[in-house]
Image: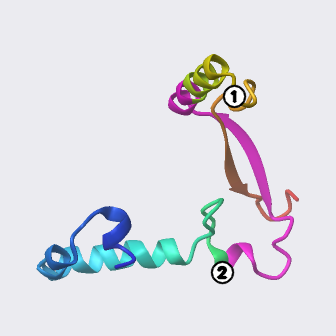
């Protein structure tokens, strides 16, 4: 169900998939389970010895998220609710530092 629920696939449908599709879904779920839920990095690598400072976060602006943020600010402003400056579509890309670049 870890794969089926979030993907919106009924369990009865999932059980009827061919072996290749079934295996691909389970492999995808395994990669997701082994990754950090916030940055997406491999937990095995990113939590290893000496990796605390082994990454660099680089800001990136997603045009779609920026549009959502602008719309949200407009709605909050028009309704007199909350912070009208939050957002701007800024997300973070996490890059693993190359050995010797740290």
Residue placed most toward the observer, 102 or 20: 20
Residue placed most toward the observer, 43 or 16: 16
Q: Is residue 83 left or right of residue 78?
A: right
Q: Which residue is mark 2?
A: 44
Compared with 63, 38 (above or below) is below
What colouring does the structure picture have? rainbow
Residue at screen point 38% across, 65% down: 6
Q: Which residue is mark 1?
A: 81
Q: Which structural element holds mark 2?
A: helix
> What stretch of residues is rendered in magenta?
45-68
Decide whether residue 63 is among the magenta residues: yes
Decide whether residue 95 is among the magenta residues: no
Q: Quadrant of the C terminus?
A: bottom right
Residue 41 placed where, x, y %?
63, 65
> In the rendered structure, which disc, 2 or 1, sits on the residue that comes first in sequence?
2
- Foreground mark, 2 or 1? 1
Kindly check if marks 2 and 1 are in contact, taking CB atoms under 8 A apart as contact. no
Residue 42 image-quadrant placement:
bottom right
Residue placed most toward the observer, 79 or 13: 79
């Amino acid at each position: 169900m870890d794969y089926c629920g979030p993907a919106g696939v009924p369990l009865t449908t999932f059980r009827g998939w061919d072996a290749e599709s079934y295996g691909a879904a389970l492999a995808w779920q395994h990669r997701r389970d082994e990754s950090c839920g916030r940055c997406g990095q491999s937990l095995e690598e990113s939590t290893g010895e000496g990796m605390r400072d082994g990454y660099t976060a680089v800001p990136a602006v997603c045009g779609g998220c920026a549009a959502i943020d602008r719309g949200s600010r407009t709605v909050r402003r028009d309704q007199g609710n909350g912070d009208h400056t939050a957002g701007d579509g800024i997300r973070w890309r996490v890059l693993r530092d190359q050995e010797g670049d740290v």
